[in-house]
Structure formats: structure tokens, C-alpha cells
Amino acid sequence: MYCKYPMLYFGVALLFVASLFLAPTVPQIAAEGLPRGATALFPSPNERFGFGVLYGINNYNATALNAGWYYNWGNAASASHPGSINAFHTARTTETGLGLTPAVAQQVAEGDPGGLWLIGNEPDMYKQDNITPVQYAILYRQAYFMIKASDPTAVVAAGGLVQPTPLRLGWLSAVWDAYQELYGSPMPADAWNIHNYILQEAPGQWGCGIPPGYFGARPATYPFTSHDDLTIFQDHVLAMRQWMADHGQRNKPLVISEFGILFPESSGFDLARVRNFFVNATNWLLTANDPLLGYEADENHLAQIWSWYSLDDTNFAEAGVTIAALMDPSTRQMRDMGQAFADQVTPLRRPYVNLIPGRVRIQPANAGAALTAMSEPVVIRATIQNRGNTATSRPFRVVIQDQQGNLIHAETVNGMPARYGGNVVIQAAWQKPAGTDWKVIVLVDPDNTVSESNEDDNRWEVTPSADLDVISLAIREQASGSLDLTASIVYHGVFPLTGAQIRFWKRDQLLAQRALPDMLPGDQTETTFTWIAPPVGVHNLAADVVLPPGISDPVPDNNRIGRDYLVASHRAYVPSISGPQFQSGATAGIQCRNDLVNPGFEAGNLSGWTTSPFATVMNAGCFDGSYCLYIGRGFNLDDDVSQVIEIRPSATVHLNFAWAIVTAETAQVQRDTFTVEIRSLDGQLLRTVQTLDNRDAHSFWYTSDFSLDEFAGQAIRLHLHAHNDGANVTAFFVDKVNLEVCEKR
């Protein structure tokens, strides 16, 4: 079975900067003319090409490939950059949490300001990050604002899908909707990221399976031989761009951080076939544009950068020799595909210089002190970088001035190496004025002595700023019917903050405004507003912060958080899927238990159940835990799963379970069915508890709940039955079956 399962963890750093994705002036291109894919954004289009590295880039002569970037699915602050190659950062998003800490984010920000971050690696894939849309929305928010707190100029890319099929774009839409529902604002993203493989989406078979927590569109049924189908590859990119346009994200870069041929030579993917796919796909990517869908800053190109999988995986998933690898990890020599890669990329390289102020900081002159609103001596530190691929020997000036143009400091820099060859730090003393009416401006090469690809990124302005992050809005209903709205705020600034306020809203109606206490960098505070006698109904509630006059927020997206809340006329407490029915039962003298063996299939098999041959468990996209029941796996098939339970006469009996349905049927008529039945031990039907069919296929898991009190005192068989006809297949999934028996002790 083929399945997506790449990638080990290794350290990586990045200098692929925010200015890369901003529209600069027309670049200075060599006399021989513009190569394919060259735009003002990419004066040297070889830098659109990248690759994924498993075993360490220093093991190979990667410079010979002439690629612009690489990544290894990690986020360490130190990385190698042979030939001035850029590197990417990845923050993994798994069930165990976010693979990033504030300390690492800060280290990366210090070394590579403006870097590009990919949040999640195939979060929609059971062999990779494997999380639901809601989980991704939560972890993405954590990652986004953690990174921005350290580096507001960082470029944060959302997504990371295996492939942008209808099913997985539905998963991404569910992420988008979940973020809006959880936080009351659109999902912030500086760029979008996909992988572009061509794999079938069939549970338990080769391919990438069903994305966790989403079943709302027909799975892709690509045959094995379509793995290198260029038309499908192109359709995927167009579909992702259409999704971006539909969600107001058209004018954002699109990163394809993985594509390639995963299958081995023994399966028919020989050198000629793999090379043809790579050449044809990248020829298309270099020129594909659309005036309605493309990225305007990149002359409407559909994709901005892309990465081949891989540099050095020669035996993907241990399925046989993989032709696609560019280098041999055993010999450390270039393979045939590496030569094909270099032949495609090398002619696209053009020399260019791009000088920028990469990072500017203002710090108290006295070590250990904090900035205040008073007039005080400070030190301005400006990091100057060349983010081009070519060194310059020409001297140029760096000028630091205030908002009136008064000179603070000027210094001549005698040329600079290509990127990653070393930075220059300009340091100047300054008496900062009192209050907030001041500005520091850093100008790199104001005399235009160096010819650059982009003259628009040579200026950096620093004004008083404070990053206030509203991290949560808790809503608690009191017995009196009033609501307590509690906002939690973290301050990521560099000087003490006085005079900020928090506001509470019901949609556009201001409910209350409160002063925040004075805050020091790193402080967290909570403020509560009690809403007396809120009216019955669904209310869109939110909290946002207001900074004092003259102070800006470098990360405004984290200034507001909101959520919908239902104020009901009355509340009825009903059993939940997790049970038990009587809220522990102890105080009422009642003891409840689930009488089923392996009820959630967490044994990883069907132990405890009597099953037909084709019934199985699945370990992706389940309602709860790691495993769930999967039945309905073929044409003209009847699957049966059952278990016997003996119930005492005095007991009450309740059945609840979770279910999900995925269908390839298109007609809105009953074709394939799933029934939950109660039968006698000899097989006689006693009751049909529920019947579902292909028309019940939906986007998410659902739960069902039934009383079975009439079977007290009997031995019964809980029987699950799936039937598929000879046309399209419908898959039925069941999880967390709870047959709860409650008795007096």
C-alpha cells in the first residue's frame, strides 16, 4: 500500500523574506533578456524552485542544482545555506500540539527576520499531522501570533494540504469557517501553501485517505496511473487559486511546498516518465497566469514558488527505488533526476543585488532597563542585509534620521556579500523624545549608488508601537441569567504601556469599555464585564483593545476576538455521547456502565465483535481516539458487525454512537444502507433502531441516541449492517458505541 509518509526532523533556518512577496520596481535584468518566469517579484526565476531534504543538505553539492530554496520540515534557527540558498521554516500541527515554542520563534526572528513559515505539514493526512479542521484552526492561530509577536514582518502561510481536491478544499473551508466561528474574525494568512500530489482518497487503500473530521465532498478516485497527469496537476492549482479568490485571498502568494513522483521505478515511473513530468509541470508553473485568479504582484502568476519532493528520498515509504530523488544519500552524488533538475533551473539564474534594512530595534542605552514614555537615551540598531544572490563591492551609505529629516547617524558600508554571507549592524545613540510623537527612519543606499532589483524596500520606519494580543474571550452564564465576559490580554511590547483600553461588543453595539492596568512587556491580564439580563437569542460577542493615541500595533489581527453565544429561554440537559446518563449516578444510588467490549475500537482491531470478512477499522478521521469501524468497502457487499449483551431486568438501557458516511453516489435515491438493529441470540430481528443511507452523507460526524429500555431482562445482539449495491460505493464509519446499562446498587 502506498501512503504519504515522508520526512524526518532536522534543523532549518530561512531568509526568504517578506519583501519577496511584495511588488517592487522593475528589476535590473542582464542584457540577454528576461528568462521564463522572471517578474519584478522574481528577477532570478531559478529562485522559484526548491526541494525537500531528509538527510541534511550539507551531505551533497546542492549548489550545483541552482535552486532558490529548500526546507526539511523543521524550524531551528540555524541552517546551512550553500550557494546562498534560502531555507523555509515549518511549524508542525499535530494532536499533541504545536511544534513551535516562543523561544524558537524569537531565535528565528533574530537570525532571519521576514522569514516564510509553513504552518502544518499535511494536517489533512492520517500519516502526517492528522488533525481536524477545528484543531488546525486553533493551532494555526497559536502559531500565527506566536511568530508575529517575535517578527511582525514574517510571512505566515496556511494550509499544507496533500492535494487541493474538492474533498480537501472542503476540509480547508471547514478550517476557515471554524476559525471565524471560534474567534469572530477571518483567518489571517500572509500566504497559502499546498502540496500538489495526485493520489486517490480511499480509506485503507493506497493514497492519502479521507481528511480527519471532514467527509463533505466526493473523494478523488484517481487511478494509480494518473499520478503524473499534468492536466490534473494544473486543475489542482487552478482549484486552489479559485478557492483563494472565493475567500478573498486572491492577492496572496501561493506556495507549492511539495510535488513530485512518489511511486517507484518498478511501478512504471522510470527516469523518462519522471523527468517529463518534472519538466512539463515546471514549464507550466513558470508561465501559468490568470488575470482573475493570479497574484497581481507577480504579474498574475498562479504559483509563486514550488518544491520538488525530494532531494534525497530514494526509497519512498520503502516501496522500491524512487527515481525522483535528486541526490543519492549513500554515494552523496547527483542522480539522473538531479541533472534534469539542474538542466531546467540553471538557465533561469540571473545575478541581482537587493539591499534592505532587515531589522531595526530601539533599546534603552542602559542595559537591563525598559523603554519609557520619558525622554531618554536609546540605542538604534539597524541590521543591513543583501538579500540578492550576488555580492556588491560598491560602497553605499546608511542614513538614520528622525521624522523631520534631522540626521541621527550616517555611515558608509564598503560593499556586501550575497545573502547569508554576513550582515552589517549599524548602531547609533539617540535621545528619544518624550511622548509618542516621534519616528526613526533608516535609509539604505539613499544615493542609489548600487543597482538593485528592488529599490522600494530600502526604507524602514520605527514609530511607538505596542502589540496587545487578545488571546481569549470566556463567557460564563450566571444562575441569575447574566453573562460574565472575560477577556485575556497579553502584552508583547518592549516598553511599559499605559492608557490602553478593552471594549466589549454585541456585534456593532458597544456594551462596555474598561481601562486596562499599566502593563510591562510579557504581562498578561484579565478584564471582566457582566452583561445584565441579556435578551434570549444568538449573540455575536467580541472584545477588542484600543491603544493610546500615537501608538500603533504591528500585529493588528490579534487585537480582537469574538464568538457566538446562545442565550436560551430555558435549558434541558440531555445525555451526551460520552455519557454516563445519570451524571456519575453515585448520589442517586445508580451505577452505569458501558457493557460493550472494545466499544470505541481502540484496540486497533475488532476484538470483542463478531464480524464479516471485509469489516475493518480505520485510523484516520475518527470521531474520538485513534480508531473507528469502517464497513461498506466494496460493490455488492454486505458487512455485519455484532456483539451480545445480557441485561438484568431492573436496568435501564441507552444506546448512543457516532457515525459518518462518505459516498460516491450522485443520485438522491437510496442505494446503499446502514442499519442498527437489535436481534435475538438466534438472529430474529427485534427492532430496527436506525436506518441511514447514501443520502445521509454529510461533512462531519453525527451522533445518534436511543432508549432500549424494552430489552431489560434479555440477552440481545447489537447488530450493525452495511449494504452496498453494484454501482458506486458508500463507506460507513462508526465510533464510540456506548450501550449504557444503569442499575440500582
Image: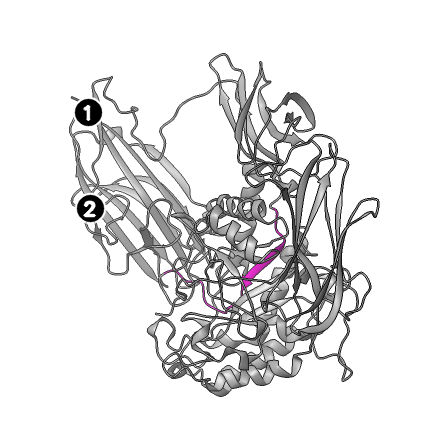
For the residue marked with disc 1, what is the amino acid? Answer: Glu
Q: Residues within 10 Å of mark 2 (few under 14, many from 20)?
A: few
Q: Nearer the viewer, residue 109 or 154?
A: 109
> Of the residues shown, which amino acid type is indicated by label 2?
Gly
Residue 596, x across and y down, in percent: 21, 40
In this picture the colour scheme is: one colour
- As helix, strand or loop, the secondary structure at mark 2 comes to loop
Give the prevailing secondary structure in the magenta stretch. loop
State the separation of the CA atoms marked 2 and 1: 27 Å
Residue at 53% x, 19% y: name it: 483
Which comes sooner in the sequence, label 2 or label 1? 2
Q: Which quadrant: the N terminus?
A: bottom left
Residue 216 in view: no
Is 444 left or right of 92, judged from the image as shown?
A: right
Q: In the rendered image, which quarter contains the C terminus?
A: top left
Percent from the top left, x then y, of residue 236?
A: 58, 66
Viewer-proximal residue among 516 and 531: 516
**Numbered label attached to residue 743:** 1
Q: Position of residue 277 (x, y in %)?
A: 54, 80
- How many numbered marks have been drawn onto this rendered protein structure? 2
Residue at screen point 76% across, 39% down:
438
- Look at the image and say whether residue 25 sits in the magenta stretch: no
Whether residue 275 can be seen here: yes
Q: Is residue 229 left or right of residue 724?
A: right
State the residue position of label 2: 683
**Compared with residue 454, is residue 478 higher up or lower down, i.e. above or below?**
above
**Front tag of 2 and 1:** 1
| Frontmost residue, 615 versus 700 | 700
Position of residue 491 in the picture relative to residue 200 (left or right): right
The stretch of residues the image draws in magenta is 188-203
